[in-house]
Amino acid sequence: MQNLEILLIGGGGREHALARALCRSPKVRRVHVAPGNGGTDGDLEGRVVNAPLAADDLDGLLAFARARAIDLTVVGPEAPLVAGVVDRWTEVGLRCFGPTAAAARLEGSKAFAKDFMRRHGIPTAESGTFTTVGPAEAWIDAAPFPVVVKASGLAAGKGVLLPETKDAAKVAVRAMLEGGAFGGAGAEVVVEERLVGEEVSLLALCDGETAVCLPPARDHKRIGDGDTGPNTGGMGAFAPTPALDPETRARVERDVIQRTVDGMRADGSPFSGVLYAGLMLTADGPKVLEYNCRFGDPEAQVLLPLLESDPLEALQACVDGRLSATRLTISTDCAATVVLASAGYPGKYAKGVTIEGIPQAEAAAHTTVFHAGTRRTTSGWQTHGGRVLAVTGRGPDLDAALKRAYAGVEQIRFEGAQYRRDIGRATGGGR
């Protein structure tokens, strides 16, 4: 089938990367991005266009998909998946890439995910789940290790707190359970052992039975160089990371990825879409920090450029349950992306700041600039979010990819722009 119309739900850098990847397929006529951003607004000579619909407006999105005879809907962010977008599309005979609401609980509820991992023997940190303060504080007091406090529900990547003391951990628990921090997402908390080691993101395309892993990536979550400051949605990434050697990768694919797919199928909630395992490579072996049920952001900005197969064919194979018969070709290159963020992010930040240098970055530095928090005006682009742009470089090795990415960053200017200068270099951390 040719001249396909695609609906892509979301409006960040991940969605811009997905839109450009999908347009590499000769079968795609147009990608409608809802709501999109300044970069997806008429990108690729109009093959990518914005649709003025919010990512959580499932009624409006469904009406749009039916009216436009959309051939495939691709869901970028987690919230619509947890809300059941795939279920609703399937009920009316529309094709949608992503897990059902039942399968998306792996991300939508950290409490569900921890229980699932315990039942299926998937390595993860020791933890307890709580809805009241007293038992949580008792667990913290008894824990023989430093702890992490996590909002169980969706908190836009910011619901993980890393207290330095037990008293600080108790304050975090009270803030969530009694103070309303993170709203409903923090009405249930997971307190767990703080794992130490090197982080790795391993993403796999899944069709309910088969899982095919993409190159292992590393995402830098902290705002500051040296992995300092508060967590963000991600300040940069690179792939593949050498931290996951072939032997350890095979172990993770077997004991984490495939075991998760098999467990979800056995539990009656087959997982189709992107399964993202956030891992910590500890002294005791790899352990799962968390699951995501979609492409990561900014991991998508380094993984999708390395996918040399037809991206549309790969996603359709997941929807149709024929991934085992589909061959994916992955480049042996490396890719790195550096996020430029607004001043003040991840706290309060201004919007409407003029951005300059994007064409120069793509032309002179041979990079790809993916838009996230931008808005297009008659005179150019302005900032419209916390994470504004992701500048991706590709090369035969990590040094070459990083050199190109940072050369692109140097071409771009907007007042107050902040970015990390050690993407691909910082390796420590714990969470």
Image (tube, rainbow, N blue to C red):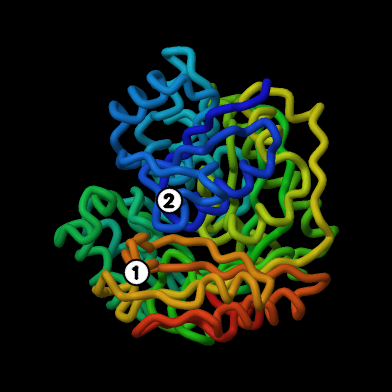
Q: Is residue 395 left or right of residue 305?
A: right
**What is the residue that sits farthest to the front in this orientation?**
378
| SS at circle 2 | loop
Residue located at (43% from left, 21% from top): 89
Per the image, the residue denoted by label 2 is: 41
Q: Position of residue 127 (x, y in %)?
A: 45, 56
Q: Is residue 42 left or right of residue 359?
A: left
Q: Is residue 336 above or below residue 191?
A: below
Q: Amino acid at mark 2?
A: Asp
Q: Position of residue 53 (x, y in %)?
A: 31, 39
Per the image, the residue denoted by label 1 is: 383
Query: How would you rate the neighbour count of disc 1 (Cα within 10 Å): few for under 14, some for 14-19, many for 20 or more?
Result: many
Q: Is residue 71 above or below residue 183?
A: above
| SS at circle 1 | strand
Q: Amino acid at mark 1?
A: Thr
Q: Position of residue 172 (x, y in %)?
A: 27, 68
Distance from the alpha carbon under mark 1 to that under mark 2: 14 Å
Residue located at (38% from left, 63% from top): 374
Q: Position of residue 33 (x, y in %)?
A: 44, 42
**What is the residue that sits farthest to the left in this orientation?**
179
State which quadrant residue 223 falls in.
Answer: bottom left
